[in-house]
Amino acid sequence: EAVERARRPELYRRMGVADTPAGRYEMVAWQVLVQLAALGDLGADGRRLGQEIVDRMFLDMDRSLRELGVGDLSVGREMRKLGETWQARTELAERVFPPAGTAAPAGAVAELGGFLQKNAGEEGRAVDGAALAEDLFTILAELRGRPFPTRPAAEP
């Protein structure tokens, strides 16, 4: 579901996200972070499910790097870089996505929008970071309004 939301054409066409591996990673990462924020409201079961989602995301990233032709000797280094960028995004998400029932901190949308504007685009093309941030906050509200399964769906 996170990947489907991350691949919505309007993110790339209207909001200016780079349709590159880096831009797609940025969108998948933020969709997963929104899911984690919603799952965090469910306590230990939600956090456990969230960890399973993150594990699957990184397994898929490893597979994707290999499909893109990254050599076996370089995959570990690239995955380490992705892990470092993931940590920075996790720290930002923890600051800007409030617990359920509380308002976002002052400036949260602007902070997230500025980050996305800087990191989701490519040179020579403007990214609408504010619209991307608003989109993520809207998705977070929608996710919090529906039940989550206690286990991820089985892979086909």
Image (cartoon, rainbow, N blue to C red):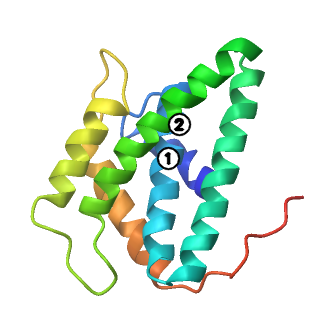
Identify which residue is drawn at 36% across, 58% down.
135
Left or right: 113, with 81 as reference point: left
Q: Residues within 10 Å of mark 1 (few under 14, many from 20)?
A: many
Give the residue number, with chain letter if any, for mark 2.
25
Left or right: 151, with 115 as reference point: right
Q: Secondary structure at mark 1?
A: helix
The part of the image, by quadrant, that contains residue 139 is bottom left
Quadrant including the N terminus: bottom right
Q: Looking at the image, which is closer to me, 138 or 55?
A: 55
Q: Looking at the image, which is closer to me, 85 or 103?
A: 85
Identify which residue is drawn at 32% across, 52% down.
91
Measured Cα–Cα span from mark 2 to mark 1? 6 Å
Give the residue number, with chain letter if any, for mark 1.
29
The x, y position of residue 108, in whole percent, is: 18, 59
On screen, 152 above or below 69?
Answer: below
Q: Looking at the image, which is closer to me, 16 or 110?
A: 110
